[in-house]
């Protein structure tokens, strides 16, 4: 379970998140949508204890993530593809993280297999394509077999086969009773994968609920998204509308 | 904590650059001792290379995490950030102490003098590596940007002691409180203290510099790293 309650995060003069509240439940894939700069990544960073909230609370399974001494058994995260040292192999990268959390060595091989990286486990991460790095990020997230999984733009750079694989993985993780929280700006992808949607704009909640309710009578999540975010797009090509 | 140290040791030993740095440092220190063995076991040239390499190596333990983005994965895996920093400190201290022992023993062997170095001389020659590596680690946590970290480390530990010379008592006091002058005093780089007067810092100040520089940088790094967004 992920709970965000009146969360505010300011970086000096910039307010990235401005009083955001929502819940993501176990057993569901919850999609996290919003235009660029809406505060999605900031919210995820606060949830995972990378950033301290200015005010309000963001908890995973009822506690703030920073209160854990070791994190991998409590939550797994893929924040972006750049979170491994290019000079290490995939296997060593995972082994070092597993070791820090006292996880058995076998978990590394399991998650490598699960993410289809077994054959390149001995290759250095610097030689990986973006899609392979994303898979390595997913492997990192799965390492501790955690009840809560957070993915930020996980299918960026994945080939169609990878996108399909990721989709079925997220569905399965939720079916196993885990909380799967998925940030993306690919609305079509979200419509295929998510049970629930949380839409934010300019750091505020715009809508939350089951995906069918949000899509409305037209059935188009994309149309619903544009209608919701019309007033809160910060960066738009072709000048202001 | 042992698991964290094992994890950081795995991170360090899995990078080729670690082994290149350690190996080349020992080679250069030994070469310098072999070439310039008239009246010292530990010529300045070798020590300067050791200081630069150790500082950069300690710094890269953290700068590499920031530049590659690994720091985010590390912080999610271990939300107790101070523990990670202490584990890194333990690993680089051990690594550079081993290098220090090897380089010092090797220097004595290749210098081929009839006398043996005294205890303070030997210990200072061994410890200057880990001391500088820890300062480098601290600088990396505080400044984060790799370029700024390396430049600051070299300016502070190598250039500053060369620049802060002269008769002004304040300048002299600062000079005497730095690591390289401390090393020069303890290894008697310019001969016996009686012969060179207050060019040298005192032995006590030298040992204090060896102790306090890493401690202060590590303490500031811990305070900063615990609070800051990563």
Image: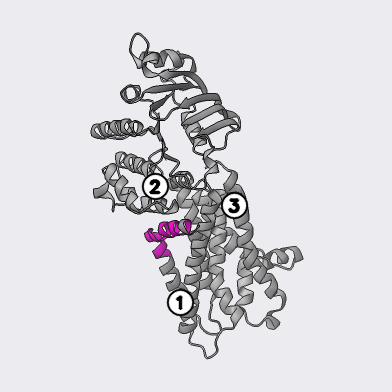
Q: Quick check: do tags 2 and 3 share a chain?
A: no
Image side of residue A130 versus residue B126, left or right: left
Pinpoint residue A168: horizontal percent, then vertical percent. Answer: 28, 31
The kind of secondary structure the magenta stretch mainly shows is: helix
- Which residue bears the numbered disc 1? B30
Magenta stretch contains residue B176: no
Observer-nearest of A80 and A57:
A57
For the point 49% across and 14% down, the residue is A231
Pinpoint residue B41: horizontal percent, then vertical percent. Answer: 53, 81
For the point 50% across and 66% down, the residue is B94
Residue A160 appears in the picture as rendered: yes
Above or below: residue B80 compared with residue A241: below
The mark that comes first in sequence, 3 or 1, is 1
Q: Chain of mark 1?
A: B
Q: Are marks 3 and 1 in contact (CB under 8 Å)?
A: no
Residue projecting furthest to the right: B169
Q: Chain of mark 2?
A: A
Observer-nearest of A136 and B211:
A136
For discs 1 and 2, the disc positioned in front in the rendered view: 2
- Which residue bears the numbered disc 3? B222
For the point 50% across and 24% down, the residue is A22
Q: Quick check: do tags 1 and 2 share a chain?
A: no
**Disc 3 versus disc 1: distance between alpha carbons?**
35 Å
Pinpoint residue A115: horizontal percent, then vertical percent. Answer: 29, 42
Pinpoint residue B114: horizontal percent, then vertical percent. Answer: 52, 91
Above or below: residue B193 compared with residue B55: below
Query: Alpha-carbon neighbours of circle 1 within 10 Å: few (<14), some, or many (≥20)?
Result: many
* Quadrant housing residue A158: top left
Query: Alpha-carbon neighbours of circle 2 within 10 Å: few (<14), some, or many (≥20)?
Result: many
Which label is found at residue A84? 2
């Amino acid at each position: 379970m992920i709970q965000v309650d009146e969360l505010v995060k300011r970086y000096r003069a910039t307010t990235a998140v401005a009083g955001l509240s929502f819940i993501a439940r176990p057993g569901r894939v919850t999609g996290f949508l919003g235009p660029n700069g809406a505060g999605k990544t900031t919210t995820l960073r606060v949830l995972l204890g990378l950033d301290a909230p200015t005010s309000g609370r963001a908890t995973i399974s009822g506690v703030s993530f920073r209160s854990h001494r070791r994190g991998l058994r409590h939550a797994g995260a893929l924040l972006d593809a750049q979170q491994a040292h290019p000079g290490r192999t995939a296997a060593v990268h995972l082994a070092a993280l597993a070791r820090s959390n006292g996880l058995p060595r076998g978990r590394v091989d399991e998650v490598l297999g699960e993410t289809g990286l077994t054959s390149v486990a001995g290759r250095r991460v610097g030689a990986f394509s973006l899609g392979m790095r994303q898979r390595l990020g997913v492997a990192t997230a799965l390492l501790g077999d955690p009840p809560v999984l957070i993915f930020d733009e996980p299918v960026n750079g994945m080939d169609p086969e990878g996108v399909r694989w990721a989709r079925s993985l997220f569905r399965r993780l939720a079916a196993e009773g885990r909380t799967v929280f998925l940030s993306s700006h690919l609305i079509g992808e979200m419509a295929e994968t998510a049970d629930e949607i949380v839409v934010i704009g300019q750091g505020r909640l715009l809508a939350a609920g089951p995906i069918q309710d949000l899509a409305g009578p037209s059935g188009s999540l994309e149309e619903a998204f544009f209608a919701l975010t019309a007033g809160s797009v910060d960066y738009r090509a072709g000048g202001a509308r | 904590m042992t698991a964290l140290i094992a994890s950081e040791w795995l991170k360090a030993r899995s990078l080729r650059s670690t082994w290149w740095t350690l190996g080349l440092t020992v080679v250069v220190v030994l070469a310098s001792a072999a070439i310039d063995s008239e009246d010292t076991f530990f010529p300045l040239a070798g020590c300067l290379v050791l200081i630069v390499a150790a500082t950069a190596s300690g710094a890269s333990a953290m700068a590499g995490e920031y530049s590659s983005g690994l720091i985010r994965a590390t912080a999610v895996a271990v939300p107790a950030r101070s523990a990670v920093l202490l584990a890194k400190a333990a690993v680089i201290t051990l690594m550079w102490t081993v290098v220090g022992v090897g380089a010092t023993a090797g220097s004595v062997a290749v210098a081929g003098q009839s006398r043996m170095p005294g205890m303070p001389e030997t210990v200072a020659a061994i410890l200057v590596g880990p001391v500088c590596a820890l300062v480098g680690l601290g600088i990396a946590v505080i400044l984060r940007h790799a370029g700024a970290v390396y430049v600051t480390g070299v300016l502070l530990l190598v250039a500053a002691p060369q620049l802060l010379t002269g008769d002004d008592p304040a300048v002299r006091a600062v000079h005497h409180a730095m690591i390289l002058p401390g090393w020069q005093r303890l290894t008697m780089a310019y001969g016996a203290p009686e012969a060179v007067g207050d060019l040298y810092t005192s032995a006590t100040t030298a040992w204090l510099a060896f102790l306090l520089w890493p401690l202060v940088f590590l303490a500031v790094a811990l305070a900063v790293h615990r609070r800051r967004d990563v």
